[in-house]
Amino acid sequence: MVHQRSILSLILVLLTTFLISCGNPSVATAPPSYTSAQLVKIQEYVPDIQVVRDRSEELKNLIQSREWIKVGNFIHGPMTEARLNMTYVIPNLVPQDQPKGRQITKDLLGHLVKIDQAATVGNTSLALSNYKDAFTDVDKFLQLIPEKGDSEQ
């Protein structure tokens, strides 16, 4: 009886060892990182986006002073160019950030359209509300931009 238990124990140990060795290893994958080429392309467009971000008070002042033609010029000029630069950056973001980037630029376009519509009818409160949302979108997008040290080694 003792001999049978030891043989049974040995068989169970061998079976367990075999099953564990046949299991798929869980290999830890490194988080996605940017190539230096991607970083160069991204950094090519970021300063222009940041310049427009830094000019946010200018648009606010134009809206508050009800200078609707200048508001339209700002929206169709620098803001639209910043949005275009954002669309150039998106393909160079890591894959999991690309949908977020696309959604942010879509939201930004919606807010710019609403500011333009508000400017057409002279609605200051609607324009100011969407102005805030537009620059919140720009800030969200800038948060997706990698630091310069995020490249592969």
Image (cartoon, grey):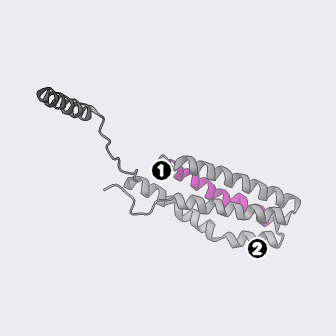
| Residue 10 position (above or below residue 120) | above
Mark 1 to mark 2 CA distance (whole Å) = 34 Å
| Label 2 packing within 10 angstroms: few (<14), some (14-19), many (20+) | few
Earlier in the chain: of badge 1 and badge 2, it is: 2
Q: Position of residue 140 (x, y in %)?
A: 59, 60
Tell me where the magenta segment starts and ends, as one range. 70-92
- Which label is found at residue 61? 2
Q: Residue at x 11, y 28 (%)?
A: 3
- Which secondary structure dominates the residues rendered in magenta? helix
Residue in front for this viewpoint, 23 or 72: 23
- Quadrant of the rendering where the N terminus is positioned: top left
Q: Is residue 101 inside the magenta stretch?
A: no
Q: Position of residue 89 (x, y in %)?
A: 52, 53
Element carrying mark 2: helix
Tag 1: residue type? Asn
Q: Position of residue 93 (x, y in %)?
A: 48, 51
Q: Residue at x 69, y 60 (%)?
A: 134
User: Which residue carries the number 1 mark?
Assistant: 92
